[in-house]
Every structure is written in C-alpha cells, then in structure tokens.
Image: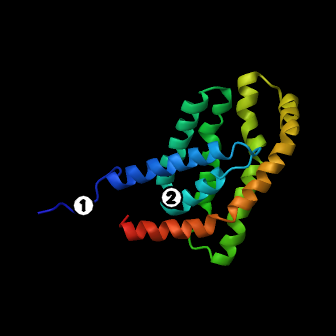
Amino acid sequence: MMDTRKRPGLSIRETALFAMLGALMFCSKILMEVLPNIHLLGMFTMVYTIVFRKKALIPIYLYVVMNGLYAGFSAWWVPYLYIWTILWGVTMLLPRGMSKKAACVVYPAVCALHGFLYGILYSPAQALMFGLDFRQMLAWIAAGLPFDVLHGLGNLATGLLVLPLAELLKRLSRMAGQ
C-alpha cells in the first residue's frame, strides 16, 4: 500500500523546479547586465511569490547564492540577503483573491516601487559596512537616484508581465500535479 500522506520538505519535482527557477533568475540577470539597473529579478520574485508563496524563497535565495558565487561574496552582495525578501514580503501581503483589473495595476506598481526604492533599501547595509553617518548615507542615496529612476521604470515595464506569467505558472503547476 502506498503512503499518500504529505511529507514535510520538498518533492523531487519541487527541488528540480526551484533549482531551474533560481537559475532562470541568475541567467536573466547576467544576460541583462548590459542595461543599467534593468532586469527581470523583481518580476520573477513577485511571480514566484504569487504562485509558490513561502516556498518562493527557495529559488530567490538560490539566485542570491549563485550571484555571490559568480561575482564574489563582497560588500555589494550583503544587501542581497534582505533586499529580495522585502519584495517577497510585500507580495505576500497582497490579497490573494485580488481581481485581475486590480492586479494589472498593483503588481507593476509594487514592482516599480521596489526599483525606485532600491537605493534606499540598500543604503543601511552600506552605511553600516562603511561607517557612513546619516548625512553621508543620504548623499549616497542621492548620488544613486538616477539609477534608481531607471531601475523603477524598468521594473514598471517588467512588472506588466507579473500577472500573465503568474497565471501561466499556476496553470503549468496544476497540470504537473504540484
């Protein structure tokens, strides 16, 4: 007789899927590095969170670790330990039963807001690691504003893909028996 109880942990299918999704995040970042602060990471973070909820942290942190392995675990990497979790957390707080009309506006707006605020979210780690006082931290944020504007606009554009990709991934997951 086969044991049909739900076991804790990940299934083999989930392990393979999350590894591929984390690798997809990493490869997309490498491919888009020619564009300043424009990437698909915010969009992927939101899509994975909408579909997989808490388990979305697995591909997100696989991406973070792969990025560190590839480019080095330096000071720039430390904020990655929390910066994607903030977007994950905000996405987790969004209502699950949101109408499609609302989601078409809210998802890109949240994605864009994360991009616009990226320098502000990044700055506490920079200030702590490099001994910046509050005034110096504000100067660091101000110097990065043009890049944050590009980041936010790029995230707004890619955020338009969140709803259709989340619906597609949900449908594919159901078909695969997840």
Residue 31 vs residue 88, the one in the foreground: 31
For the point 46% across and 53% down, the residue is: 55
Residue 127 vs residue 177, the one in the foreground: 177
Q: What amino acid is found at the position of numbered circle 2 in the picture? A: Arg
Rendered position, 73 above or below 84: above
Rendered position, 79 above or below 101: above
For the point 61% across and 73% down, the residue is: 98
- Asked if residue 137 lies left or right of residue 26, the reply is right
Q: How crowded is the residue under tag 2: few (<14 C-alpha within 10 Å), some, or many (20+)? A: some
Residue 99 vs residue 149, the one in the foreground: 149
Q: What amino acid is found at the position of numbered circle 1 in the picture? A: Arg
Residue 2 in view in this figure:
yes
Image position, residue 95 (x, y; %):
60, 68
Provide the secondary structure element on which disc 2 rests. Answer: helix
The residue beneath circle 2 is: 53
Rendered position, 62 above or below 77: below
- Which quadrant of the structure image shows residue 164? bottom right
The residue beneath circle 1 is: 5
Image position, residue 68 (x, y; %):
57, 32
For the point 64% across and 57% down, the residue is: 43
Residue 12 vs residue 2, the one in the foreground: 12
